[in-house]
Amino acid sequence: MEKRNPFFAIMLVVICTFLTSFGQYFIKLGTAKISGNLISILSVPLIGGFLLYGIGAVILIIALKYGELSVLYPFIALSFVWVFLLSTFVLKEVILFVNWFGLIFIILGVSLIGWGGNHG
């Protein structure tokens, strides 16, 4: 079964990764509010994080309808990029120099996959 990889399908996956990464960020914030009582898991950040994950999943389903899994799914690696940037600049986590090289390799790999998918 031959499918094309229209630009909009790739962009939908990129949007999906952005939403799920922010979802992870909000879940991280929400974990600080979890206490010994079960109701504490109903915090706004946790619920917001799960909602962003759900929206991201729906967007991914739509994208996969219009493109090849082998090309689109590797774009999920962009989640690592967004989480890396959020961790570094928003959460002020300490990031090692070698981690920046890893980030560059992820970006290069995703770029090559996307380019190959559109020109292959």
Image (cartoon, rainbow, N blue to C red):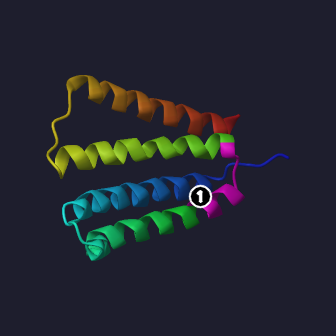
Location of residue 73 in the rendering, given as x and y in whole percent from the top left corner: 59, 45
The image quadrant that residue 120 belongs to is top right
Judge from the rendering whether residue 84 lies leftward or rightward of residue 11; answer left or right. left
* Residue depicted at x 35% and y 32%: 103
113 lies above or below 2: above
Q: Nearer the viewer, residue 61 or 7?
A: 61
Instruction: Name which residue lies at 45% across and 30% down.
Output: 108
> Residue 107 lies in what quarter of the image?
top left
Amino acid marked by disc 1:
Phe
Coordinates of residue 29 in the picture (x, y in percent): 23, 61
Badge 1 is on which residue? 8
Question: Which residue extends farthest right?
Answer: 1
Residue at the spot x=41%, y=61% of the render? Answer: 19
Check disc 1: other Cα within 10 Å, few if <14, some if 14-19, many if 20+.
few
Q: Which residues are magenta?
A: 60-69
| Dominant secondary structure of the residues highlighted in magenta in the image | helix
State the image coordinates of residue 62 (x, y, percent, origin top left). 64, 64
